[in-house]
Image (cartoon, helix red, strand yellow):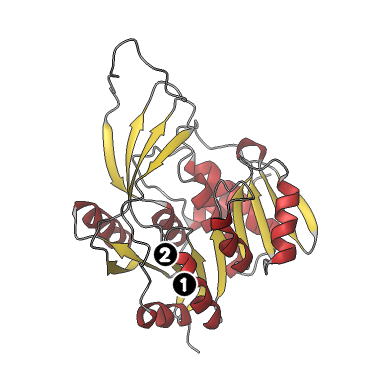
Amino acid sequence: MSRDIDVLVLGGAGVDTIVYVPDLPLPLPHADSYMIDSGIRTRAGQTGDFVAVGLAALGLRTHHLDFLGDDPEGDLVRALHHDRGIALTAVPQPVGTKRAVNLVGPDGRRLSLYDTSRAHPDDRFPADTLIPLAEAARHVHVSITHPCAHALPLLRETGATLSTDLHDWDGENPYHEPFALAGDVVFLSAAALTDPERTMRDIAARGRAEAVVATAGAEGAHVLTDGKLTHVPPVTPPAPVIDSNGAGDAFAAAFLFGRLTGEPPSRCARYGAVAGAHACTVPSTETDAITRDILLARATVS
């Protein structure tokens, strides 16, 4: 079977409105308002968009499939993909394009407010669109956005390997479990986990993951493969940390780049750490993924 797509990214298309705030949690002011001198900006880019941009910047043939509305927000997403040369298949979404508001503190931490009204419980990716794209892909990265969970059984039938990012899963929310158990590679943040190793081993034991990766911010990451847990040290960012938004997506994209180019898990995780550190130096209002040449050069520096 010809697979002329390296990675099909499923779901996670949308727009974010970025607001830089004086602190997180945002303290209540004496008055009823804040003056935001840095501006309030809306730009294309949610988790699937960032992964797709990251993969394409690393030279992988990338295709993105998701629901988009016929609205200004959808136009922003279409323009992002067009400008980056990323193939995009947009399924019409009558209720509009997904959107969120990100509050970003001075230290780069963020609080995301997601508008869940931009989806419908009956949404399904059309099988005659999803299956040919997945069959043409070497790998499929599945966002945990609705309605990707319903696509998992169809994706498994295509023979493509799968990855997913559970983000800040607490290890218990049942919504995430089908994704956790379906992925060949499973990413998640350790931020909400009381025992990251236990959660990682549970994913590997009950699912089909060959690699489970838990990112831990400035503490690096942990990779579980073949029953062995390995710590991946953090990488010093090449510039001051501005914003952590998109760091996890950058990590996932670079890890998948390594996997698809035949690198061992330790090297893949090194790539991920380098890309995540780079992303932390990029303001949320911009989209600037690390390129292959820069990634490879920084990954060789001890």
- Across and down, in percent, residue 162 comes to 56, 69
Q: Nearer the viewer, residue 1 or 203?
A: 203
Horizontal arrangement in the rendering, residue 37 relative to residue 229 (left or right): left
Q: Is residue 43 visible?
A: yes
Q: How far is the residue under mark 2 from the one under mark 1?
A: 7 Å
- Secondary element under disc 1, as helix, strand or loop, is helix
Q: Is the residue marked by circle 1 packed among few (<14), some (14-19), or many (20+) residues within 10 Å?
A: some
Residue located beneath label 2 in the image: 147
Q: Nearer the viewer, residue 137 or 159?
A: 159
Residue located beneath label 1 in the image: 151
- Is residue 57 placed above or below 126 in the rendered structure? above
> On the rendered image, what quadrant is the C terminus found in?
top right
- Across and down, in percent, residue 113 comes to 39, 40
- Secondary element under disc 2, as helix, strand or loop, is loop
- Across and down, in percent, residue 212 comes to 67, 58
- Is residue 107 placed above or below 127 in the rendered structure? above
Toward which corner of the image does residue 296 lie, by quadrant?
Answer: bottom right
Labelled disc at residue 173: none
Q: Nearer the viewer, residue 255 or 77?
A: 77
Residue at the (42%, 58%) spot, across then down: 48
- Mark 1 belongs to which amino acid? Ala
Residue at the (37%, 47%) spot, across then down: 287
- Mark 2 belongs to which amino acid? Pro
Residue lying at the far bottom of the rendered structure:
1
Residue at the (69%, 43%) spot, across then down: 233
- Is residue 36 placed above or below 139 in the rendered structure? above
Q: Is the residue marked by circle 2 packed among few (<14), some (14-19), or many (20+) residues within 10 Å?
A: many
- Is residue 234 placed above or below 77 in the rendered structure? above
Looking at the image, do the residues carrying marks 2 and 1 touch, with CB atoms under 8 Å apart? yes
Residue at the (54%, 57%) spot, across then down: 175
